[in-house]
Image: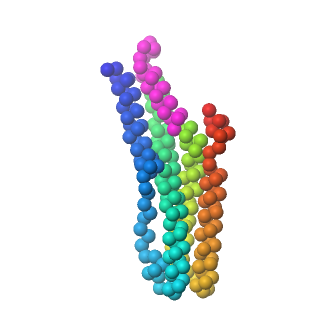
Amino acid sequence: MDYWIAAIYAYVALAGVTLIPAIRNLVGRVPLYPGGSSFSDSDYFSEPIKKQLEQHFTRIQGTLRFWKKKAAIYTSFHYYCVVWTILSSWAVPLIGAITPQNGGSNAKWLLVTISSHVALSLSFHRGLKVAEGMKAFRLGESEFYDLYRRLLDRPKSFGENEEKQIEQYFAEVERIRRLVRSAETDSLPDVESIKSLT
């Protein structure tokens, strides 16, 4: 077998194998990390307030799982595209330099394979607005957990008494959810932007 054909098979296999983490995040379940001590263990709040906070947290867990899954999908595909773009940027000129000039080689098909793979990956990256989605979901998740930990560790930073503290906390959580929702809808792909890529 021509070693250029073997290189094409090796490239396609490697590109497929390195895509597995993104596919696993897309189809699999992404668990939340255990958060340590929660509201039920807190000495700062009365039992009725603890119950309110626990109920609120159970209601937002579905949103947190959604954010985490989306962040994982976007992050893994983003790094997939970045790594393959970097590798192709030096592989293509190198292969072009060592390709026989007689035109009978299968090296050109290796170049076509690499270029097509990277172009397709980057088209999906831009069309699906992967970088924007990764940033929106990761920042939303991070901001929520920062807020959550602040209420557990420094509740007085939210107000003087329990009622003010949880009202401020709930308002801040709603603000974060609105920001992520807005960023999510702003980063949705639309037909016109996809047409501009082709």
Q: Please give the count of numbered marks on the rendered protein.
A: 0
- Residue lying furthest left: 1
Q: How is the image coloured?
A: rainbow
Residue at the image point whose x is 46% and y is 76% from the top? 38
Quarter of the view holding residue 34:
bottom left
Residue at the image point whose x is 49% and y is 61% from the top? 65
- Residue lying furthest right: 192
- Compared with 27, 145 (above or below) is below
Q: Position of residue 21 (x, y in %)?
A: 41, 47
Closest to the observer, 4 or 66:
66
**Magenta span main SS:** helix
Quarter of the view holding residue 101:
top left
Residue at the image point whose x is 64% and y is 63% from the top? 178
Residue 120 visible at all = yes
Quadrant of the image containing the N terminus: top left
Q: Position of residue 158 (x, y in %)?
A: 60, 79
Q: Report the magenta residues as a range.
A: 98-121
Q: Position of residue 54 (x, y in %)?
A: 50, 76
Residue at the image point whose x is 62% and y is 68% from the top? 174
Q: Position of residue 125 (x, y in %)?
A: 55, 42
Residue 159 visible at all = no
| Residue 118 counted in the magenta span | yes
| Residue 56 counted in the magenta span | no
Quadrant of the image containing the C terminus: top right
